[in-house]
Image (cartoon, helix red, strand yellow):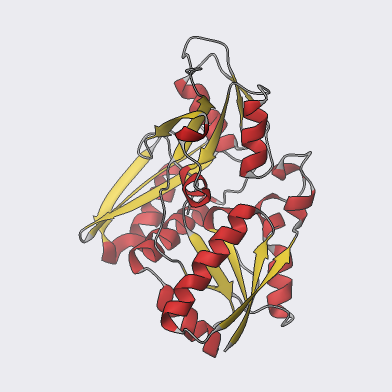
Amino acid sequence: MKIKIGSRKSHLALVQTNLVINEIKKHCPSAECEIIEISTKGDKILDKPLLDFGGKGVFVTEFEDLILNGNIDLAVHSGKDLPTTLSTGLTILATPMRADCRDVLITRANEPFEENKLCTVGTGSLRRSQQLQGMYPNIKCVPLRGNVPTRLKKLANKEFDAVVLAAAGLDRLGITANDGYTFTYLDPNTFIPAAAQGIIAIEGKSDTPIASLVEKINHVPTNICFNCERDVLSLLGADCHQSVGVYSYIDNENITISAFIGNSGIKTVTTTLAEAKTAASKLAGELL
């Protein structure tokens, strides 16, 4: 079986795509997977915040057009980059096991982050900015875009006192505190991640032989959290113009969902897995 898989060109995106290919080959060793590297609008425009030119869809639209036109079979996305609505005819076929969902405050080694000191923190996320300023009133958040190495290079060059990145991306790239940084991991129960942070999502057409194969690598608990968090996001009508975070985790037969939007404060609900969708709706209602 030949499979054409679309991926962004960054090192992290290619690592994630190869993780997916490795999982596919566990179920179909004879699969011939070809990576098609694509530069999205979001990759090309780095001097403006995402909210200035289209939001999350700027990382996805080109892939969806290529799938619908038959140029590629699948697209591998970071779950947090997906808009709440996909193009007609497409679906998320699988979500492999979630990686670390936490955010990480990163400073240069031996230069600790001082709570009472005026510091500049690089982040392009309204969600991160709002939560950081709630924790550290003296900091100034400055827009920062680009791939992980680019952001860390700016930190090393002292353009910022700190940056905030997703733990999952750092882990997948093999970047650790031993590379000259101090990592402060932020508790996802109090510093709420982006919906689906740490989750890889594989998009394609349903009801095809390739879809049937890809569905075998789906991790059910991750998929439940993925859909639950995106349901909250959708019900809130939230986009990247708003500060919003959603995080869920499963404990035995229960799921706990926490979220905030704007200045709402964090709201949390816990319910059975069977009631996850209802709980997402309830939580969104409490936040609106």
- Viewer-nearest residue: 177 or 137: 177
- Residue nearest the viewer, comparing 22 with 268: 22
Residue 268 is situated, as x and y percent measured from the top left of the image, at 33, 43
Residue drawn at the location 46% of the way across and 33% of the way down? 177
- The picture quadrant where one finds residue 159 is top right
Residue drawn at x 47%, y 78% as measured from the top left = 25
Residue at the extreme left of the image, as rendered? 252
Residue drawn at 51 percent across, 50 percent down: 236
Q: In this view, does 83 lie to the left or right of 287?
A: right
Q: As rendered, which of 9 and 263 lies closer to the eye?
A: 9
Decide which of 33, 84 is in the foreground and name it: 33
Q: Where is residue 32 in the image (x, y as percent from the top left)?
A: 59, 83
Decide if residue 116 is on the left or right side of residue 139: left
Q: Quadrant of the N terminus?
A: bottom right
Looking at the picture, how far across and down is residue 279, in whole percent? Answer: 34, 56
The reply to whether residue 280 is in sight is yes
Position of residue 125 measured from the top left corner of the image (x, y, whole percent): 60, 38
Q: Relative to residue 100, is residue 1 depicted above or below?
A: below
When the figure is inspected, residue 119 is found, relative to residue 228, above or below; the finding is: above
Q: In this view, does 188 lie above or below 224?
A: above
Asked if residue 142 shows in the view, the reply is no
How many numbered callouts? 0
Name the residue: 43% across, 49% down. Answer: 284
